């Protein structure tokens, strides 16, 4: 029994050491990869369904703001279009969040006289 306990202690001590080295490696690698927290995606719109999310995404992309849609996988698999599983988040890079909110808060004007009369 003592041999087993001693072996487990050495094994556990080895894992602790490897966890420390992994943490130090993570710290070293983050210093060399660059980037910043401000580039993290930020939710700018919570859509009730996938169609609304795609419209918002398209509006942002037409303004030159990259956007992605995130939602539950089950909603996509089963094709839910309403309810909690159908909800989607529209995300943009953190630096462009204010610009995205401005674009989305602008009123859309529809030109009703766009057609030519014959």
Image (cartoon, rainbow, N blue to C red):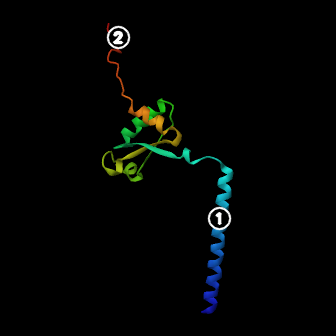
- Above or below, 84 relative to 13: above
Measuring from the top left, give residue 84's x and y in whole percent.
Answer: 33, 51
Identify the element where label 2 is drawn. Answer: loop
Residue placed furthest toward the left: 83
Report crowding for label 2: few under 14, some 14 to 19, many 20 or more residues within 10 A (C-alpha). few
**Residue 22 disc label:** 1
* Left-right relation of 2 to 41: right
Which residue lies under the disc numbered 2? 116
In the picture, the quarter occupied by the N terminus is: bottom right
Residue displayed at 39% across by 40% down: 53
Q: Nearer the viewer, mark 2 or mark 1?
A: 1
Question: What residue is at 66 percent from the left and 50 percent from the top?
Answer: 33
Quadrant of res 110: top left
Q: Secondary structure at mark 1?
A: helix
Q: Is residue 42 left or right of residue 10?
A: left
> Residue 40 at what x, y percent from top left?
53, 47
Image point (40%, 51%), residue name: 72
């Amino acid at each position: 029994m003592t041999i087993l306990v001693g072996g487990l202690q050495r094994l556990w001590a080895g894992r602790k050491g490897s966890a420390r080295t992994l943490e130090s490696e993570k710290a070293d690698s983050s210093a060399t990869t660059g980037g910043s927290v401000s580039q993290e995606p930020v939710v700018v719109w919570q859509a009730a369904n996938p169609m609304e999310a795609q419209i918002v995404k398209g509006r942002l992309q037409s303004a030159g703001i990259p956007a992605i849609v995130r939602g539950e996988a089950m909603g996509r698999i089963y094709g839910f279009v309403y309810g909690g599983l159908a909800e989607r988040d529209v995300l943009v890079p953190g630096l462009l969040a204010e610009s995205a909110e401005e674009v989305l808060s602008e009123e859309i004007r529809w030109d009703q006289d766009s057609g030519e009369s014959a």
